Image (cartoon, helix red, strand yellow):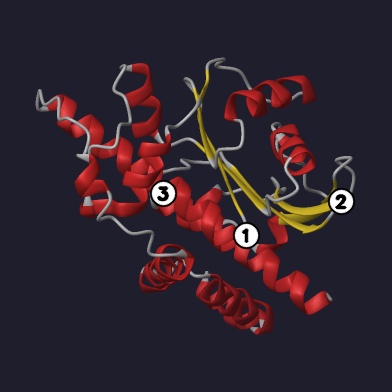
């Protein structure tokens, strides 16, 4: 339905803003997609007035098919569109894909700092993520071809996160919120592991008996609440979509004299 599609476009735009605000997607690099049907997706594209992920608008989120064709208008799809298309094609359980460039994750991997389960209740989702093991795609390439995307997916297996060496990360989820929060979680894990390494520490993994006391608090807590918190931060800093829309509507509805006076 048109209303649902409009709402999804806005959520993808918000996801991009959250990732940029958290430092996972600097400048114009990075993209987010969400499946809307078996063979269609919404994805953040680059428009003629590109200003970077922090200022992504719903207009930048375009409807494409898994063949890469769709309603682009003046927009162009990401160079790494195959990363999204192949992930959604090969993994039907995945509903959303995030590709970001968190400096801490890239630096930790290149420095040989393993993202091990050294955290406990400080960050339970990060603890579980690290305990499962985070796969690495070892080629530092732009994933702009289907064969490269297939290589990456082979390295990723059925995990929800994969490090792209010298490049960034890909995270997936059954919801958009889940994929975004997983990206933030792996970034937070990398930041802590890097800080420990800088301090000369080499902690042992959390003991099994303690790890058993770290419950999975569920998507409603881990994803929905964190998503709302990050949306509230955008709103607090004047970066929310609604405020931007009001500003645009205000300019559109202003008289020519008012516009001249404002300039």
Residue linked to disc 3? 184
State the CA–CA distance, disc 2 to disc 3.
28 Å
**In the drawing, does residue 199 fall left or right of residue 17?**
left
Q: Residue at x 21, y 39 (%)?
A: 206
Binning the other alpha carbons within 10 Å of mark 1 as few (below 14), some (14 to 19) or many (20 upward) gives: many
Give the numbered dot on residue 12. Answer: 1
x, y (%) of residue 237?
A: 37, 68
State the CA–CA distance, disc 1 to disc 3.
15 Å
Q: Residue at x 52, y 69 (%)?
A: 263
Q: If the image is split into quadrants, where does the N terminus sit?
A: bottom right
Residue linked to disc 2? 39
Ranked by sequence position, the earlier of labels 2 and 3 is 2
Which is nearer the eye, 110 or 69? Answer: 110
x, y (%) of residue 179?
A: 54, 52
State the CA–CA distance, disc 1 to disc 2.
18 Å
Ranked by sequence position, the earlier of labels 1 and 3 is 1
**In the drawing, does residue 79 fall left or right of residue 28?**
right
């Amino acid at each position: 339905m048109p209303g649902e599609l409009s709402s999804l476009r806005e959520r993808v735009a918000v996801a991009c803003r959250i990732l940029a605000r958290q430092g996972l997607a600097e400048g114009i690099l990075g993209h987010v997609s969400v499946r809307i049907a078996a063979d269609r997706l919404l994805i953040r594209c680059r428009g003629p007035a590109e200003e970077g992920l922090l200022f992504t608008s719903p207009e930048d989120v375009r409807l494409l098919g898994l063949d890469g064709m769709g309603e682009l208008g003046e927009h162009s799809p990401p160079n790494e569109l195959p990363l999204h298309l192949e992930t959604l094609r090969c993994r039907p359980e995945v509903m959303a894909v995030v590709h970001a460039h968190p400096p801490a994750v890239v630096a930790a991997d290149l420095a040989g700092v393993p993202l091990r389960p050294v955290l406990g209740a400080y960050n339970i989702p990060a603890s579980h993520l690290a305990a499962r093991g985070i796969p690495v795609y070892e080629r530092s390439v732009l994933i702009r071809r289907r064969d490269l995307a297939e290589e990456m997916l082979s390295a990723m297996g059925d995990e929800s996160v994969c490090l792209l060496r010298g490049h960034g990360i890909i995270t997936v989820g059954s919801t958009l919120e889940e994929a975004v929060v997983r990206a933030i979680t792996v970034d937070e894990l990398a930041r802590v592991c890097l800080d420990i390494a800088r301090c000369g520490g080499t902690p042992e993994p959390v003991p099994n008996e303690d790890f058993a006391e770290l419950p999975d608090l569920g998507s409603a807590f881990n994803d929905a609440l964190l998503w709302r918190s990050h949306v509230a931060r955008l709103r607090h800093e004047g970066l929310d979509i609604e405020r931007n829309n009001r500003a645009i509507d205000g300019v559109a509805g202003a008289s020519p004299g008012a516009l001249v006076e404002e300039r």
